[in-house]
Image (tube, grey):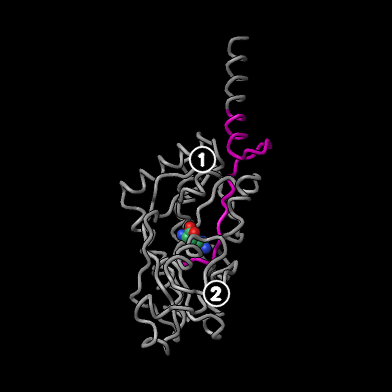
Amino acid sequence: MIKRLKKIITASMILSITVIGLTGCGKETDKIVLGTSADYPPYEFHKEVNGKDTIVGFDIEIAKEIAKDLGVELEIKDMEFGGLLADLKTNKVDFVIAGMTPDAERAKEVDFSTIYYNAEHGLVINKKDIDKYKDISDLKGKIIGVQKGSIQEDIATEQIEGAQIKALGKVSNLILELKTGKVDAVVVEQPVAGAYVKNNAELYMTDIIFKDEEGGSAVAVKKGNKELLDSINKTIERLIKENKIDEFVLNATESIDNE
Ligand code: ARG
């Protein structure tokens, strides 16, 4: 009897320790909180689903699978991209999926999963400028829009001579600035460029591609949260094996609304 009781107590202790470890903030819960920046279709974006504003995208599908494999519920927090790593460090979120590139600088602050998706960096311009911007050198001295805290900030600075960088918190606002002529071009990952162009008849994605040796997207967790990272890597490995990521990307791309 006592032996059985001991077993039960140990089992429930292990359970609560696991849950505490998951949220990292000591309160018992059966949910995991995702931090993202839902301005990045097809990765993550807002869409009306059954009359309700919903955050969707292939990153969100991956997050759902991670939560499912952990047996917990998923809560999504939509924040500015530039603040996501700080939110992770201060336990406001448990993990980050936001098309985030695991570069060396960030890897000093947080831990990254294996890469789950690769994309190149492209350029969005106004259709009326098609003949003006054919090559990176044509962008010399122009006003280039990039997301604050993104690697595109560095890429544009390093690869466009004399670029006047305008960094904003949300990509959707950068696109507005482009349409109103406040910036000349916007650098984002190519699938994102394609998504915004699909939604805006007056915009155009050029053939220009920016070099990026550290490219790709990975999931971030708080430094040292090995248990969560191991589980995330297992989920990613399964999704890659089942060709699920390609399927998620395709579905998300198709589900982007046309204006
Ligand atoms: N891949 C780029 C980076 O890691 C941009 C990602 C932007 N993501 C977003 N959800 N807005 O810096």
Does the stretch in magenta take in 25?
Answer: yes
How many numbered marks does the figure carry?
Answer: 2
Q: Residues within 10 Å of mark 2 (few under 14, many from 20)?
A: many
* Closer-to-camera residue (14/218): 218
In the rendered structure, which segment of residues is drawn in magenta?
Answer: 15-41
| In the image, farthest residue toward the right | 27
Residue 23 to residue 82: above or below: above
* Closer-to-camera residue (75/179): 179
| In the image, farthest residue toward the top | 2
**Mark 1 — residue?**
71
Residue 24 to residue 160: above or below: above
Amino acid on which the number 2 mark rests in the picture = Leu
Does the stretch in magenta take in 4?
Answer: no
User: From the viewer's perspective, is 136 left or right of 35?
Assistant: left
Assign a secondary structure to mark 1: loop
Residue in the picture at 48% in, 81% down? 259
- Residue 24 showing in the rendered view: yes
**Mark 2 — residue?**
174
Q: Looking at the image, tell me whether mark 1 or mark 2 is earlier in sequence order.
A: 1
Residue in the picture at 45% in, 36% down? 230
Alpha carbon separation for disc pair 1 and 2: 38 Å
- Residue 44 showing in the rendered view: no
Q: Determine which quarter of the picture holds residue 130.
A: bottom left
Q: Residues within 10 Å of mark 1 (few under 14, many from 20)?
A: few
Give coordinates of residue 49: x percent, y percent.
53, 68
Give coordinates of residue 152: x percent, y percent.
47, 64
